Image: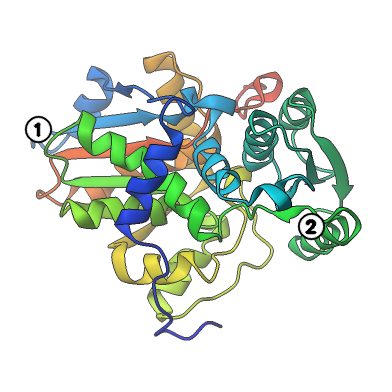
């Protein structure tokens, strides 16, 4: 467990600097609203508007491109010629592969053998080398270290890196420029890179932040309640992008700047994923649906201070061949 007094290592200024590096490289993704969703959010007669930041339309189909590109941009040229390595089940893997290709660098991606085929195919499509591992964090990290030793590649951590966090925060930086007067921003939370970057921006603009987490992978909620970092153990959730534990850089930001963590049962995530896709015609993955479900939860809608609610849709890389209701 991490000491409850560990310091924050990333600042708002780092997010602003990352935005400069990403200009012309990352998409400035659009913001979506939907009448049916707003009506559902206004069920107690309090009018509410929910705004969705469409990172499902980002390069590689997820916000992860922002952090990966920012981090790789800051690797010295002499180190970058040895390439980069990471471990990821999907979206970060694609992001590092794509960002490395843009920098002309080799990329080795350690992926658990259980990773979704759609995400493995995308990684290979960017020219990266896929290294299989067992579906455990310990084996992912062990395999990545071996590749580092063999190649001299620089590790681009999936979330627990100040430059990655700063890059992820640029989604929220755009969001507050696109939608004025937000009272709350909700972001899904796995390792915590996105919600941490979001919190840095939100604090600067005096906006509340909530982390959305699967009930079957609730280490952030338990850590927040205990006031100290508690590692993830045996996560069970349909949201495959939210399986990891918080890290030494993300935890202090979540501890100090995120208002609360709301957990969502998978059954609710599935229902809201289908509802969102049917009503908006935008494909989102389960990790995004966890944030949508949180925005429509009693914990959020019973707070009358939150009238203009922002939700970051983290990605759209759903496995279309086997959607969770496809057999119904």
Among the two numbered marks 1 and 2 on one chain, the one whose residue lies closer to the N terminus? 1
Which quadrant holds residue 123?
Answer: top right
Q: Is residue 52 left or right of residue 100?
A: left
Where residue 140 is drawn, which disc sits there?
2
Query: Residue 183, percent across and down?
Result: 15, 46
Q: Nearer the viewer, residue 67 or 313?
A: 67
| Residue 231 in the image: above or below residue 146 | below
* Residue carrying label 1: 47
Q: Residue furthest top?
A: 281
Secondary structure of the residue carrying numbered label 1: loop
Residue drawn 38% across and 38% down? 20
| Res 189 visible | no
**Which residue is found at the position 12% from the left and 38% from the top?**
44
Q: Residue at x 76, y 23 (%)?
A: 125
Residue 141 is situated, as x and y percent measured from the top left of the image, at 77, 62
Instruction: Please say if 253 is above or below 177.
Output: below
**Foreground disc of the pair 1, 2:** 2
Residue 166 in view, yes or no: yes
| Residue 190 sits above or below residue 287 on the image | below
Quadrant placement of the C terminus: top right
Residues at marks 1 and 2 touching, judged by CB atoms closer than 8 Å: no
**Viewer-proximal residue, 144 or 260?**
144
Question: Which residue is outermost to the right?
Answer: 150
The image quarter containing residue 136 is bottom right
Q: Residue at x 25, y 52 (%)?
A: 202
Q: Is residue 172 left or right of residue 236?
A: left
Callout 2: SS = helix
Residue 82: percent from left, percent from top: 79, 48
Give the side of residue 166 with respect to residue 310, left or right.
right
């Amino acid at each position: 467990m991490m000491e409850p007094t560990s310091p924050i290592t990333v600042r708002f200024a780092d997010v602003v600097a990352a935005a400069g590096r990403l200009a012309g490289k990352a998409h400035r993704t659009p913001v979506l609203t939907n009448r049916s969703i707003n009506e559902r959010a206004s069920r107690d007669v309090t009018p509410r508007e929910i705004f969705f930041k469409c990172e499902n339309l980002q390069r590689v189909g997820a916000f992860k491109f922002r952090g990966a590109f920012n981090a790789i941009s800051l690797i010295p040229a002499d180190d970058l010629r040895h390439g980069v390595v990471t471990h990821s089940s999907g979206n970060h893997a694609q992001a590092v592969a794509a960002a490395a290709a843009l920098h002309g660098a080799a990329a080795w991606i350690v992926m658990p053998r259980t990773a979704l085929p759609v995400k493995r195919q995308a990684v290979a499509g960017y020219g990266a080398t896929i290294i299989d591992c067992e579906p455990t964090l310990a084996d992912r990290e062990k395999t990545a270290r071996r590749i580092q030793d063999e190649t001299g590649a620089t590790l681009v951590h999936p979330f627990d890196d100040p430059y990655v966090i700063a890059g992820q925060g640029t989604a929220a930086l755009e969001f507050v420029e696109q939608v004025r007067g937000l009272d709350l921003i909700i972001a899904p939370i796995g390792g915590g890179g996105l919600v941490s970057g979001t919190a840095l921006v939100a604090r600067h603009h005096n906006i509340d932040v909530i982390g959305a987490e699967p009930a079957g992978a609730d280490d952030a909620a338990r850590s927040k309640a205990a006031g100290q970092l508690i590692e993830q153990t045996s996560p069970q959730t349909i949201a495959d992008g939210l399986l990891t534990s918080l890290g030494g850089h993300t935890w202090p930001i979540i501890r100090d700047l995120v208002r609360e963590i709301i957990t969502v049962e998978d059954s609710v995530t599935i229902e809201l994923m289908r509802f969102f896709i049917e009503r908006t015609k935008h494909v989102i993955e389960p990790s995004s649906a966890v944030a949508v479900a949180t925005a429509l939860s009693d914990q959020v809608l019973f707070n009358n201070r939150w009238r203009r609610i922002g939700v970051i849709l983290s990605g759209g890389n759903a496995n279309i061949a086997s959607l969770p209701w496809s057999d119904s």
